[in-house]
Amino acid sequence: MNTPQKEYIRLLLGIFFIATAGWGLFVELVETLEFGMNWVIYHFFPLIFFGFTIITGMRLLQKKDNAFKLARIIFALQVPYFFLGGIYYFFVAGASLLVSLGNVSSIHFFINSKMSLYLGGNTSHVEIGVNLLALAAFVFLRRMKNDTDEIKPEDIIQTIKPPTAGRPRQTQLPDELT
């Protein structure tokens, strides 16, 4: 992918991450203040996830080297959804097309920013899902690859190896042989 397209994607992703995670962070802070300080533990992980997303958006806008790698991590965190007997995980920053199977199988599309992580509680509810929008974004960014991501040793060798095609290589003989 050429540089202008990457820069456009970098700009859009940066703004998107800051806006959607900013909204999620705002909602979590309001809920923490509304329900009292005993809810701080409940909102700890959402604050970390949304904070990480905002920092990633800022790094994208600042054109930092590892920003696209962090963006892939953000989307990878949004792909799984599960509710397994009292353990519940769900994270979305922006939009979700959620397909889930279990006690209740469903397909949901929504625009929101939400992070939930519950541990405990006795329930027989079982549901496993995938956020198809986050999966598509992850695959797109994985294929796009930033130029500085995952540099292989052979790439470095190719850049320092002189080109030999096109003209014969001239060698200088030592003075004692001439």
Image: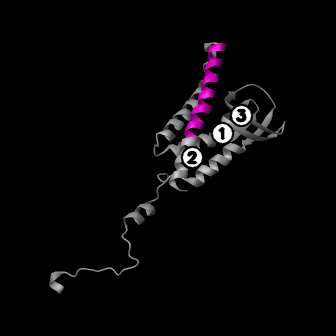
Q: CA distance from mark 3 to mark 2?
A: 20 Å
Residue beneath the point at 46% across and 56% down = 151
Mark 3 — residue?
111
Quadrant in the picture for the N terminus = bottom right
Of residues 3 and 141, the one nearer the viewer is 3
Residue beneath the point at 55% across and 51% down = 5
Asked whether, in this view, residue 104 is left or right of residue 65, the answer is: right
Q: Earlier in the sequence, mark 3 or mark 2?
A: 2
Point out residue 109 in the picture as x, y percentages from the top left corner: 76, 38
Q: CA distance from mark 3 to mark 1?
A: 13 Å
Mark 1 — residue?
78
Type of amino acid under label 3: Ile
Q: Are marks 3 and 2 in contact (CB under 8 Å)?
A: no
Residue beneath the point at 40% across and 63% down = 159
Q: Earlier in the sequence, mark 3 or mark 1?
A: 1
Q: Residue furthest left?
A: 176
Up/down of 68 relative to 41, above or below: below
Magenta stretch: give its range. 13-34
Type of amino acid under label 1: Gln
Q: Secondary structure at mark 3?
A: strand
